[in-house]
Amino acid sequence: MPILTDIKEILTGLSITFSHIWRKPVTVQFPEEQRPMPPRFRGSIVLTRDPDGAERCVACYLCSGACPVDCISMAAAEGENGRRYAAWFRINFSRCILCGMCAEACPTLAIQMSPEMFRCKRQVMDMVYEKEDLLIDGTGKDPEYNYYRHAGIGVVQPRGSSPSEQEPADPRSLLP
Ligand code: SF4
Ligand code: SF4
């Protein structure tokens, strides 16, 4: 009979409802409670340091060139040891779409995406972050990586002395 089928379905629904009554709620009372975000979550951007504590960024402009919305700008400078660094480095977060392409492009792992995600501000000019605001004390996601140790380039140590570097060849020795 249709009425018995209806009653059975109502009782089935109510039994499911009552079976959930004593379960612990899963609602997170944001912002008082905050769930930890996954390490690869793209919530913000930081500039990291190498394991020796030096700035990783060598102001190569690759992140700026890769950025689809053109929100990274900087000026390159050279230290007394010949090492390049960013004299200033700026990200306009009001334009940033957190796509992560800058971090993909960076050869030194200086620029990295961070799970921190509360950079919203009321004033648009407060969304422009300078190097001092972006630079963190740590190494970020690859604690052992030091670009100069691997790439060498004869700036902070003699050519050929880096772990992943070969001795420089004398071009005259290649002549026939
Ligand atoms: S995350 Fe994307 S949009 Fe934001 S600065 Fe990097 S490349 Fe540009
Ligand atoms: S953050 Fe990386 S890609 Fe951008 S300028 Fe510095 S070293 Fe180059």
Image (spheres, rainbow, N blue to C red):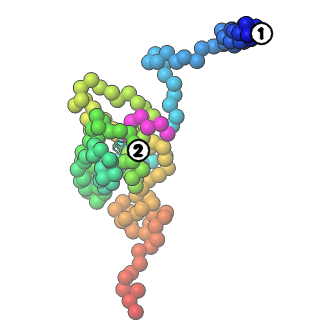
Tell me, yes or no, whether the highlighted magenta stretch contains residue 174: no
User: Where, by quadrant of the figure, is residue 140 drawn?
Assistant: top left
Outermost residue, front side: 1
Residue 78 x, y percent position in the rendering: 25, 56
Q: Nearer the viewer, residue 81 or 124?
A: 124
Q: Element under label 1?
A: loop
Find out if the beta carbon at label 1 lies less than 8 Å from the nearest ligand 1 atom.
no
Residue at image location 32% in from the left, 39% down from the top: 96
Residue 100 got which mark? 2
- Location of residue 55 with respect to 96 vertically, above or below: below
Res. 5 in view: yes
Q: Element under label 2?
A: loop
Tell me, yes or no, whether the highlighted magenta stretch contains residue 44: yes
User: Where, by quadrant of the figure, is residue 60 drawn?
Assistant: bottom left
Residue 86 got which mark? none
Please, what is the three-letter code of the amino acid marked with disc 2? Gly
Residue 1 got which mark? 1
Find out if the beta carbon at label 2 lies less than 8 Å from the nearest ligand 1 atom.
yes
Residue 121 x, y percent position in the rendering: 29, 26
Residue at image location 44% in from the left, 73% down from the top: 167
Q: Are marks 1 and 2 in contact (CB under 8 Å)?
A: no
Residue 63 x, y percent position in the rendering: 34, 50
Q: CA distance from mark 1 to mark 2?
A: 61 Å
- Location of residue 145 with respect to 138 vertically, above or below: below
Q: Which residues are magenta?
A: 40-46
User: Where, by quadrant of the figure, is residue 130 drawn?
Assistant: top left
In the picture, the quarter occupied by the C terminus is: bottom left
Please, what is the three-letter code of the amino acid marked with disc 1? Met
Q: Nearer the viewer, residue 81 or 98?
A: 98
Res. 110 in view: no
* Label 1 neighbour load within 10 Å: few <14, some 14-19, many 20+: few
